[in-house]
Amino acid sequence: MTGKMAIVGDGDSIMVFKAAGVETFPATEEKKAREILRKIASEYKIIFLTEELAAPLGDFLKRFDEEPYPVVLVIPSNRGGAGYGEEFLKSAMERALGVDILFNNEK
């Protein structure tokens, strides 16, 4: 496993990643995404997952916090973001560092 990257998401959202050399795994529903993640987790260091699939898999994704790899990054789909990816990243950073360094909105 030397830096391999993958993306799981709907076909339209993942095509640009394929052009960049990222392995693509199409999924449009939670069950299929969960199945794919189980199969590829040991093979890839970074796995991108679209927000629409990540939101219902929140509890399942927590298992990836226990190991250094794979790193699961939630990204917006081609339809745009709903903010779940930002919240996911914020939560991960707070767990890792104990403080919100990315989205501190204090004025």
Image (tube, helix red, strand yellow):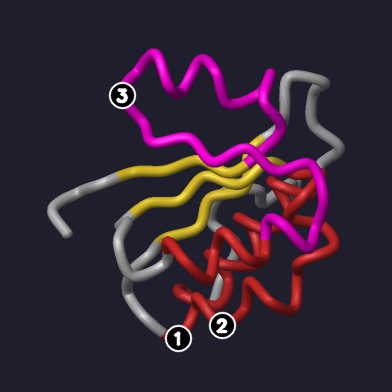
2 and 1 marks in contact (CB < 8 Å) = yes
Label ID, residue 66: 1
Inter-mark Cα distance, 2 to 1:
6 Å
Q: Which residue was labeled with disc 2?
A: 63
Which span is picked out in magenta? 9-33
Left or right: 57 with respect to 82?
left
Distance from Cα at disc 3 to Cα at disc 1 = 27 Å
- Quarter of the image with the C terminus is top right
Does 14 lie within the magenta span? yes
Rendered residue at 31%/24% (across/down): 21
Q: Amino acid at mark 1?
A: Glu
Residue plotted at (61% across, 46% down): 49
- Type of amino acid under label 3: Gly
Q: Nearer the viewer, mark 3 or mark 1?
A: 3
Q: Secondary structure at mark 2?
A: helix
- The three-letter code of the residue at mark 2 reads Arg
Q: State the residue at coordinates (62%, 37%).
A: 26
